[in-house]
Amino acid sequence: MRTARWTAILAFAWFGGVVAAADNYPSRPIRLIVTFPPGGSADVMARAIQPHLEHELGQPVVIENRTGAGGVTGIEAVARSAPDGYTIGIGAAGALAVNLSLKEKMPYDPFTELAPISGLAKTPFLLAAAPNFAPDAVKDVIALAKRQPGAIAIGHGGNGTAMHLTAQLFAHMAGVAVTLVPYRGTGPATQDLVAGHIPLAITDVPTAVSLIQTKQIKVLAVTSRERFEAVPDLPTMEEAGLPGYESIGWFGFVAPAATPKEIIARLNAAIVTALKDPAMLERTRTLGAIPMPFSPAEFARYIRSEYEKWAAVVAQTGAKEP
């Protein structure tokens, strides 16, 4: 009886501490783990929303770029953090959905070890070329790849990312053999494209918009089903000769699974308010992205649907993580 009484007292004290912590949240700086390097779209969007979150939460939001394994390293760090709301992360399709189909074993289960908070933004990918790469259209790239199987390299944001499968899907639907070159995010891949170290890369609008405007890269197609407002002159992959092709990149906020619902709700309210702020809306539009102000439940359903979609692509293409 004495043991049971002490167990009950300790459980009550712990629960009371959690409630008190949730009531006072946040009372110190929040660490925001971004799973890709500076310069990529996830980092650009994180730094765009950072001051808005600090205003809404009344505390500093400190960005930490934790890269590796196509975003898995950073999201694993989030999953293993204390569930107190002071470590959250921005994950992309790769770490939250794609890798479940590509990897034999994941270091975490995104459906049981993470708590979705809200979406951040989505944007289509771009098939971009170095300025010195001769083909100026997708059909010319495909023709060259058929004449020289394996000779054309396509850089992407890392094995297990949506950019990886975007390149894989292109090769599969075009019926060509290409060499896929993984990078630690779209930023490094795009930088090598500008330097002419690789002929082609899968990038996205937030990463590449200024490079497009200054003609440091040339973009051959956008991967959305319809033309994208931020780059209206670009043909879609379907218009370029690959019927049914579509691939959209996205990012969202997650926390450790055991984070109290009250804290998740507080974070969600801050993120959604920030995403709907006129200045943030304009910044997002300028970057060529679309905001995703989801509820936690909506984001959970979205992640599940993305897992199912990309699992079908993995089955269709036979893609495997090297």
Image: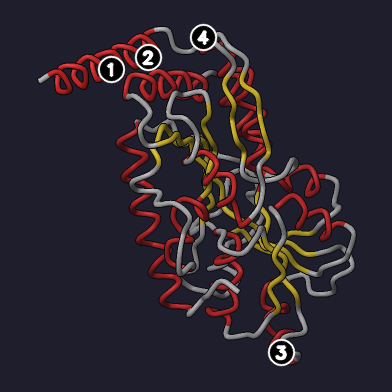
Residue position for label 3: 149
Crowding at dot 2, Cα within 10 Å, few <14 / some 14-19 / many 20+, comes out as many
Residue type indicated by callout 3: Pro
Pointer 4 with pointer 2, Cβ within 8 A: no
* 1 or 4: mark nearer the eye: 1
Residue type indicated by callout 1: Phe
Quarter of the image that includes the C terminus: bottom right
Picture residue at 75% right of the left edge, 67% below the top: 200
- CA distance for labels 2 and 3: 58 Å
Left or right of 312 on screen, residue 39? right
- CA distance for labels 3 and 4: 58 Å
Residue position for label 1: 15
Residue position for label 4: 27
User: Residue 97: x percent and y percent?
Assistant: 44, 55
Element under disc 3: loop
Q: What is the total number of numbered labels drawn onto the structure image?
A: 4
Crowding at dot 1, Cα within 10 Å, few <14 / some 14-19 / many 20+, comes out as few
- CA distance for labels 1 and 2: 11 Å
Of the image marks 1 and 2, the number of the one nearer the N terminus: 1
Question: Which dot marks residue 81?
Answer: none
55 or 277: nearer the eye? 55
Residue type indicated by callout 2: Ala
- CA distance for labels 3 and 1: 62 Å
- CA distance for labels 4 and 2: 10 Å
* 3 or 4: mark nearer the eye: 4
* 3 or 1: mark nearer the eye: 1
